[in-house]
Image: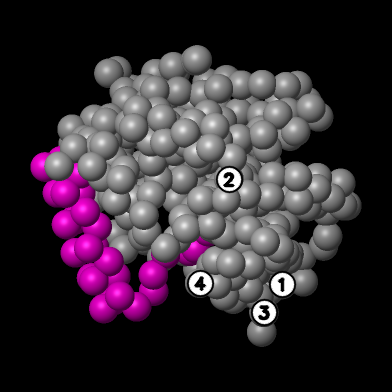
Amino acid sequence: MTRIAVTPGFHLNVESSGAGEPLVLLHGFTGSARSWGPLIGTLAASRQVLAVDMVGHGCSYAPPDLQHYQMEQVTADIIAVLQSMGIRKADWLGYSMGGRTALSLAVAHPDAVGRLVLIGASPGLADPGERADRIAADDALADRIQSAGVPAFVDYWESIPLFASQARLPEAQRAAIRRGRLANSPLGLANSLRGMGTGVQPFVDAGRVTMPVLALAGELDRKFVAIGQEMTSQMACARFELMVGAGHAAHLERPGACAEAIERFFATPTPTPTGGPE
């Protein structure tokens, strides 16, 4: 565990493993640096893997105000942590909420990003009506977390259709995922929804993402398959790969297939940007 101060009283936790070129991992909502399953060990065999506890999650600070949960500040804080570790540029891997964050960071801080891998990620919502509806839903869910508590929320969260395919995971792995979710604070989870939820975060124009991108989505996660295909079609140097037999958390359900796809991507010579879609 390495807690790194960003500003007085505010810190982010980073778990480092392996050696070599840096790869930063950003987890999904309710996750942590330790929620990547066997994928992290595979990747750390050839690289320095820096798994970040996102604000409000894991061992990072969960401040009571929303400043550090707003996407612009979230990305700036993560960059500040890496710079304090002597890292100016890295490859990035983001899952779900972490994928939205990685996309936002790639646009706001392109010089800090070599290559970008996204799993079950989206650029946010462009339609104002959809944004308003999602903000209202996330605000209600945040209130529910703080009123009912994390255990009751996790019971609900694990029951939603998005995670149905995780029922096929080994019991010990499901128990470890649940323990990680339960370790989060109600304030941290609630403020994460209020500050950097899909509706409230600024929509990312995929056409502004210029570095090489690999987007992965599980074939059972049809919504994010469509999002990934549409998103990569707008990028200058991007490709989409389907993870057969997996749902939203493809890195947990098909870690070997994800690792192979990611390592192929990193081993491929960097393509020359075409200038993006017409």
* In this picture, residue 71 sits left or right of residue 35: left
Which residues fall within the magenta stretch?
Answer: 121-147
Label 3 vs label 4, nearer the camera: 4
* Residue 46, numbered label: none
Q: Earlier in the sequence, mark 4 or mark 1?
A: 4
Marks 3/1: CA–CA distance: 7 Å
x, y percent for residue 12: 41, 25
Q: Which residue is mark 4?
A: 223
| Residue type highlighted by circle 2 | Leu
Rendered residue at 57%/59% (across/down) = 247
Q: Which numbered disc covers residue 169?
A: 2
Secondary structure beneath label 3 = loop
The three-letter code of the residue at mark 4 reads Lys
Residue plotted at (49% across, 63% down): 122
- Judge whether 123 appears above or below 229 on screen: above
Q: Secondary structure at mark 4?
A: helix
Residue 275 is labelled as: 1
Name which of mark 1 and mark 2 comes first in the sequence.
Answer: 2
How many neighbours does mark 3 have within 10 angstroms: few (below 14), some (14-19), or many (20 or more)?
A: few
Q: In the rendered view, tell whether residue 20 sits above or below residue 121.
A: above
- As measured in the structure, the alpha-carbon distance from the residue carrying label 3 to the one carrying label 4 is 22 Å
Badge 1 density bin: few <14, some 14–19, many ≥20, Cα 10 Å: few
Q: Earlier in the sequence, mark 3 or mark 4?
A: 4
Can you tell which of label 3 and label 2 is closer to the viewer? 2
CA separation in Å, label 3 and label 2:
39 Å
